Image (tube, coloured by chain):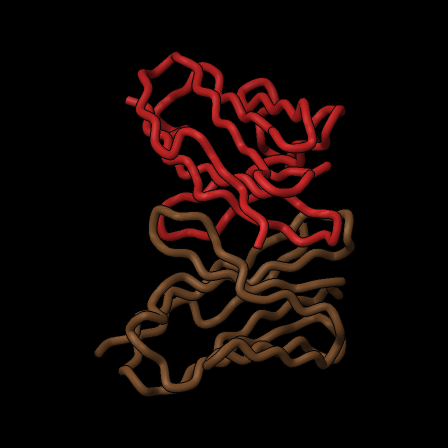
Chain colours: A brown, B red
Amino acid sequence: TQLLEQSPQFLSIQEGENLTVYCNSSSVFSSLQWYRQEPGEGPVLLVTVVTGGEVKKLKRLTFQFGDARKDSSLHITAAQPGDTGLYLCAGAVSGNTPLVFGKGTRLSVIA
Amino acid sequence: GAVVSQHPSRVICKSGTSVKIECRSLDFQATTMFWYRQFPKQSLMLMATSNEGSKATYEQGVEKDKFLINHASLTLSTLTVTSAHPEDSSFYICSARDRYYEQYFGPGTRLTVT
């Protein structure tokens, strides 16, 4: 399985601050997905990016796929306590291969 | 969005017994389903890939005789943990891939072996 390096692993910020989570690999991915997971629940898909350089926005969340399709970032603007959770990036080398996950970023937004 | 269900959500069993976990895609057909395991405060680790009508493909280090996977239909895959031991206690999550190659995850099953 290919390795996805996700950073930071832990992040604690104040409400209203901005933050960026990074996901990097030496491998090229056909698609990369971002998930959010609450304790005791399964991951919930936030976004899928497939084109190099692609940028997608979901309210205050901005997702970017690197030009070479080896890296991605998640930027949250004006974080809120409701954003607290585990954020996971996951990539597939091809359409037939399973998703492999980064180690996750545990975000805590303090009111 | 696509919905994947898992049953049971929680199970407690005694050491040496077997436990079956079901994974269903509710509103789409999934020729491929995946089983992941997640330890506390860690990410998801792929255990096996389950293809409808054929044998599952297991990741390195996962015992296929201990974790039996059956994918009998396009909407159902099962994972049976045989002769469970306390070290098998974990959060098991399945996912199903739709025809657009997007993976959707179930809510997970918390297994506790006493």
Residue A105 percent coordinates (x, y): 43, 66
Tell whether B70 sits left or right of A22: right
Residue A27 percent coordinates (x, y): 73, 64
Which residue is drawn at the image coordinates 74% and 57% (left, top)? A93
Quarter holding the C terminus of chain B is top left
Which residue is drawn at the image coordinates 36% and 73% (left, top)? A11
In this view, the residue farthest toward the front is B27
Residue A92 percent coordinates (x, y): 70, 56
**To which quarter of the image does residue A15 belong?**
bottom left
Where is B37 relative to A110, above or below? above
**To which quarter of the image does residue A71 belong?**
bottom right
For this rendering, which residue is in front, B17 or B4?
Answer: B4
Residue A79 percent coordinates (x, y): 36, 80
In this view, the residue farthest toward the left is A111
Tell whether A92 sits left or right of A104: right
Where is A27 relative to A18, above or below? above
For this rendering, which residue is in front, A53 or B15?
Answer: A53
Which residue is drawn at the image coordinates 40% and 29% (left, top)? B8
Quarter holding the N terminus of chain B is bottom right
Where is A100 relative to A110, above or below? above
Which residue is drawn at the image coordinates 46% and 61% (left, top)? A36
